[in-house]
Image (tube, helix red, strand yellow):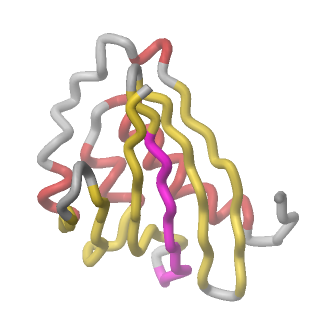
Amino acid sequence: MHTHHPEESAVRIPLELYMRGHAEDNADHMRAAFLPTARLESVREGPLTSWDLDFYCQRFKNTPAPDESTRRRSIDWLDITGTSAMAKVTLVHGSVTFTDYFVLLKTEQGWKIANKAFHAQPQ
Protein backbone atom coordinates (compact mmCIF):
# COMPACT_ATOMS: atom_id res chain seq x y z
CA MET A 1 0.00 0.00 0.00
CA HIS A 2 1.52 3.29 -1.01
CA THR A 3 -0.09 6.69 -0.77
CA HIS A 4 0.94 9.72 -2.82
CA HIS A 5 -0.27 12.16 -0.22
CA PRO A 6 1.02 15.76 -0.33
CA GLU A 7 2.18 15.37 3.31
CA GLU A 8 4.05 12.11 2.71
CA SER A 9 7.56 13.57 2.57
CA ALA A 10 6.87 15.57 5.74
CA VAL A 11 5.49 12.50 7.57
CA ARG A 12 8.65 10.57 6.64
CA ILE A 13 10.91 13.12 8.41
CA PRO A 14 10.32 11.92 12.01
CA LEU A 15 10.40 8.28 10.86
CA GLU A 16 13.76 8.85 9.19
CA LEU A 17 15.01 10.63 12.33
CA TYR A 18 13.89 7.60 14.33
CA MET A 19 15.76 5.21 12.04
CA ARG A 20 18.84 7.49 12.14
CA GLY A 21 18.60 7.52 15.94
CA HIS A 22 18.92 3.74 15.91
CA ALA A 23 21.73 3.78 13.35
CA GLU A 24 23.77 6.34 15.33
CA ASP A 25 22.55 5.24 18.80
CA ASN A 26 21.62 8.90 19.30
CA ALA A 27 18.91 10.12 21.67
CA ASP A 28 18.86 13.61 20.10
CA HIS A 29 17.35 12.19 16.91
CA MET A 30 14.73 10.37 18.99
CA ARG A 31 13.80 13.54 20.87
CA ALA A 32 13.41 15.34 17.53
CA ALA A 33 11.22 12.54 16.13
CA PHE A 34 8.78 12.09 19.04
CA LEU A 35 6.39 14.33 20.90
CA PRO A 36 7.65 14.92 24.47
CA THR A 37 4.49 13.16 25.70
CA ALA A 38 5.01 10.05 23.56
CA ARG A 39 4.75 6.55 24.95
CA LEU A 40 6.50 3.47 23.57
CA GLU A 41 4.68 0.26 24.34
CA SER A 42 5.03 -3.45 23.79
CA VAL A 43 4.21 -6.84 25.22
CA ARG A 44 7.51 -8.71 25.44
CA GLU A 45 7.56 -12.19 26.94
CA GLY A 46 4.26 -11.58 28.68
CA PRO A 47 4.09 -8.29 30.57
CA LEU A 48 3.21 -4.92 29.09
CA THR A 49 6.09 -2.48 28.90
CA SER A 50 5.17 1.19 28.64
CA TRP A 51 7.99 3.72 28.48
CA ASP A 52 7.98 7.50 28.39
CA LEU A 53 10.37 9.25 26.04
CA ASP A 54 12.95 10.11 28.70
CA PHE A 55 13.21 6.47 29.79
CA TYR A 56 13.50 5.32 26.18
CA CYS A 57 16.20 7.89 25.40
CA GLN A 58 18.39 6.58 28.24
CA ARG A 59 18.98 3.50 26.06
CA PHE A 60 20.98 5.50 23.51
CA LYS A 61 24.68 6.04 24.25
CA ASN A 62 26.08 7.31 20.90
CA THR A 63 27.71 3.92 20.33
CA PRO A 64 26.37 2.31 17.15
CA ALA A 65 25.88 -1.45 17.31
CA PRO A 66 28.86 -3.56 16.19
CA ASP A 67 26.64 -5.07 13.47
CA GLU A 68 25.18 -1.72 12.32
CA SER A 69 26.45 -2.21 8.75
CA THR A 70 24.22 -5.29 8.38
CA ARG A 71 21.10 -3.85 10.01
CA ARG A 72 18.15 -2.91 7.79
CA ARG A 73 15.27 -0.49 8.37
CA SER A 74 12.31 0.28 6.14
CA ILE A 75 9.11 2.32 6.14
CA ASP A 76 6.59 -0.29 4.99
CA TRP A 77 3.48 1.85 4.74
CA LEU A 78 1.92 5.18 5.59
CA ASP A 79 -1.71 6.19 5.99
CA ILE A 80 -2.30 9.94 6.26
CA THR A 81 -5.55 11.80 6.98
CA GLY A 82 -5.47 15.51 7.71
CA THR A 83 -3.25 16.13 10.74
CA SER A 84 -2.91 12.47 11.76
CA ALA A 85 -1.09 9.52 10.28
CA MET A 86 -0.09 5.93 10.88
CA ALA A 87 3.08 4.16 9.79
CA LYS A 88 4.59 0.69 9.90
CA VAL A 89 8.38 0.40 10.12
CA THR A 90 10.49 -2.78 10.14
CA LEU A 91 13.91 -2.93 11.76
CA VAL A 92 16.09 -5.99 11.20
CA HIS A 93 18.60 -5.74 14.04
CA GLY A 94 20.78 -8.82 14.09
CA SER A 95 18.84 -11.79 15.47
CA VAL A 96 15.71 -9.73 16.25
CA THR A 97 13.24 -8.14 13.82
CA PHE A 98 11.21 -5.28 15.26
CA THR A 99 7.86 -4.27 13.80
CA ASP A 100 6.94 -0.74 14.85
CA TYR A 101 3.51 0.83 14.48
CA PHE A 102 3.47 4.60 14.85
CA VAL A 103 0.72 7.16 15.34
CA LEU A 104 1.88 10.58 14.15
CA LEU A 105 0.42 14.08 14.46
CA LYS A 106 1.08 17.26 12.52
CA THR A 107 2.03 19.87 15.12
CA GLU A 108 3.21 23.47 14.93
CA GLN A 109 6.73 22.00 14.96
CA GLY A 110 5.94 19.64 12.07
CA TRP A 111 5.04 15.97 12.08
CA LYS A 112 5.92 14.10 15.27
CA ILE A 113 5.53 10.54 16.50
CA ALA A 114 2.82 10.57 19.16
CA ASN A 115 3.02 6.89 20.11
CA LYS A 116 4.81 3.70 19.19
CA ALA A 117 3.62 0.13 19.67
CA PHE A 118 6.09 -2.56 18.73
CA HIS A 119 6.72 -6.28 18.52
CA ALA A 120 10.15 -7.94 18.78
CA GLN A 121 10.43 -11.24 16.85
CA PRO A 122 13.55 -13.33 17.49
CA GLN A 123 14.83 -15.11 14.38
Image coords of residue 85 (percent x, y): 62, 75
Name the residue at 37% across, 40% down: 21
Vertical position of residue 48 compared to residue 97: above or below: below
Q: On the image, which quarter does residue 22 sit in? A: top left
Taking depth in this image into account, of 60 and 89 the one nearest to the observer is 89
Q: Measuring 40% from the left and 56% from the top, which residue is drawn there?
A: 118
Place residue 72 in its image quadrant.
top right
Q: Quick check: is 100 in the magenta stretch?
A: yes
Horizontal side of residue 82 vs 5, given as left or right = left
| Image quadrant where residue 53 sits | bottom left
Q: Give the percent coordinates (x, y) of residue 78.
A: 69, 63
The residue range painted magenta reads: 98-108
Q: Nearer the viewer, residue 46 or 75?
A: 46
User: 24 or 123, which is in the foreground?
Assistant: 123
x, y (%) of residue 121?
42, 39
The residue drawn where x is 26% and y is 51% is 44
Image vertical order of residue 11 relative to residue 36, above or below: above
Does residue 21 lie above or below 33 as drawn? above
Of 55 and 48, nearer the camera is 48
**Picture quarter with the C terminus:** top left
Q: How far from the left and from the top, in percent, is residue 67? A: 37, 12
Q: Is residue 42 left or right of residue 55?
A: right
Q: Extreme bottom residue here?
A: 82
Q: Quadrant of the N terminus?
A: bottom right
- Going 47% across and 48% down the picture, which residue do you hit? 17
Residue 109 is left or right of residue 38, and the answer is: right
In the displayed orientation, state which residue is furthest to the front: 46
Overall secondary structure of the magenta section: strand
| Magenta-drawn stretch contains 82 | no
